[in-house]
Amino acid sequence: MTGTPQGTGRSSSAFLIAAVALPLVVVAVFLVASAVPRWTVAAPAYDFLFRADTGYNPASNQTFVNFVVRDGHLVADVRPALANSYPPQPSLFLFDHRTLTPTEIRLDLPSRLDEGETLRVVPVAPLAARRVLDGVNAPDGYAFDARYQHGPGFVGELFGMNRYGSRAAVVKAGRVVTITIPDPMRYSIQPIGWLEAEGR
């Protein structure tokens, strides 16, 4: 009489259990490791300013804008665009550390300068009462992190669902606070500075 030895059957069962359990254990460890910083690292304590550019539009915009921190205040340096160039369309965003959401700061910037004018400095009026800390890191240790995004992975690639763009986050000691920027798609995200706490 023939049959599978009892020991072999137990080994096969143990192997199948291990094959199923091991990936689950790895996923569980990864999830816990990702969650620990959210439990142990304090939330951001400072608002954050950043620039996000949309597409080029030479027909309606003939200036190049650069946001600069001078003496603790944010200004926009507006210069004439080079001939046959395609200046980006800049947007200014404020990331609120309390709500963890960004809000666009609407600016009235000139789309062209007067003939012979090489520079126009435009104060950012909505932030006139706030001091801007010009630096990569906030005083609480958070830092800006720009991440190139492409997704939704292999399945998206296979069915033509992939899209490319940029996303941003502020990070500290493993904690990642993602900044979700509203449409339209932004192809470039650049940090400007952190805002000193109100009342200081």
Image (tube, rainbow, N blue to C red):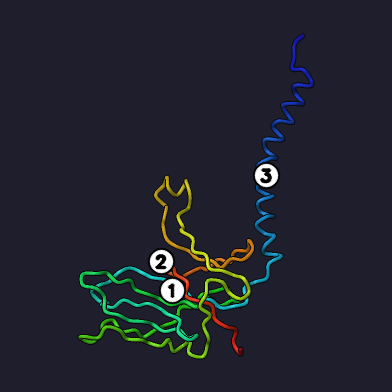
Asked if the residue at tag 3 contacts the one at tag 1, i.e. Cβ–Cβ closer than 8 Å, the answer is no
Q: Quadrant of the N terminus?
A: top right
Give coordinates of residue 163: x percent, y percent: 41, 56
Alpha carbon separation for disc pair 3 and 2: 37 Å
The x, y position of residue 173, in whole percent, is: 64, 63
Residue under pointer 3: 24
**Which callout, 1 or 3, points at the residue further toward the start of the chain?**
3
Mark earlier in primary sequence (3, 2):
3
Q: Which kind of residue does numbered mark 1 sit on?
A: Arg
In the picture shown, does residue 55 fall above or below 70? Answer: above
Extreme residue in the right direction? 6
Q: In 3D space, how far apart are the residues under numbered discs 2 and 1 (Cα atoms)?
A: 8 Å
Amino acid type at image mark 2: Ser
x and y, in percent, of residue 63 in the image: 28, 78
- Answer few, some or many: residues within 10 Å of disc 3's Cα (few below 14, many 20 plus, some between 14 and 19): few
Disc 2 element: strand
Query: Which residue is drawn at the image coordinates 43% and 86% (left, top)?
Result: 124
